[in-house]
Image: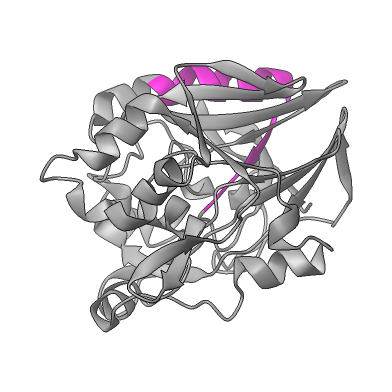
Amino acid sequence: MPISAQSPSPFVIRHGERREMRIGDWEVKPCLAGRFRLDGGAMFGVVPKTIWAKSIPADDKNRIPMVMRPLLIAGRGKAILVDVGAGSGYEEKYETIYAFEDSENLILSLKTQGVQPEEVTDIVLTHLHFDHAAGVAAPSGDSWKLVFPNAVHHVQKAQYDHALNPNPRDRASYFRGRIEILERENAVQFHEGDCTLYPGLDLVTAHGHTPAMQLVKVSGGDETLLYCADLIPTSAHLPIPYIMAYDLDPVLAMEEKEPILDQAYRDRWILYFEHDPFVMACYVDKENGKFVPGEYVNL
């Protein structure tokens, strides 16, 4: 059922009835790595505030509330994280700009799932922007240490190269010290393009937001879940033209969204939203020819 047919207030959490989810060999569990805020105009690009503010409210600085919602995928003797959030140890200026709230951090979230940092075997980093990947490292004196010391960190090589040589437009999105440690500690496995990480667990690249971002598709039986990363950061970004100003190639981002949403609608995929404070996941519906959230899913 589309959002417009449900609650009259758009600012309520809509997760649906909670259910344990196993997809093929994999059990999928949501995690929370903290909350933060980004400029609403930047998040919705050319979409006017009078429209996007109906979905997500802005504060007096025009920032909208967002979450960092990694996914824990367990099975086949593996404990796999998709993204790790921003982590901790930021200078005051970053705390002020982004209004980080880490009382609900990833380590605590994992512990509620019975997982210690040392037990994480793999981390898939969709891309290396700070709100997705900076949590791989924590301050240690004048340097950094790995938060998940036994994990193999899976990164697209083209994204890694770009992160170390960003352009002026996206330089602020990368925290170099928290990226370089992966290669220095021999903790990274590079990938080049789409691939199967493990049976039922595929990496699907998209390039409009940033070079070689990788979405994660979990599939088995008649169920598929897609971790949308920043191709579709919130359920409010389902309409094709709703593209972020952060996207380096917004036209390409639109072109990449449409076939994925077509297939998600046709094959009843679950879309998992990394940044939506109100909707964790949902199926896709259509209303007047436009993609809208369908049935909400609470993992």
> In the rendering, at what x and y percent does residue 119 appear?
75, 54
Q: Quadrant of the N terminus?
A: top right
Q: What residue range appears in magenta?
A: 256-274
Quarter of the figure with residue 40: bottom left
Looking at the magenta stretch, what is its main secondary structure? helix
Q: Nearer the viewer, residue 127 or 7?
A: 127
Image vertical order of residue 254 relative to residue 147, above or below: above
Query: Left or right: where does residue 283 sit relative to residue 236?
Result: right
> In the rendering, at what x and y percent does residue 268 appear?
73, 26
Q: Nearer the viewer, residue 44 or 88?
A: 88
Q: Nearer the viewer, residue 16 or 100?
A: 100
Residue furthest to the left? 168
Q: Tell me the residue at 60%/31% (across/down).
A: 216
> In the rendering, at what x and y percent does residue 97 appear?
27, 74
Res. 132 visible in picture: yes
Q: Tell me the residue at 64%/22% (across/down).
A: 202
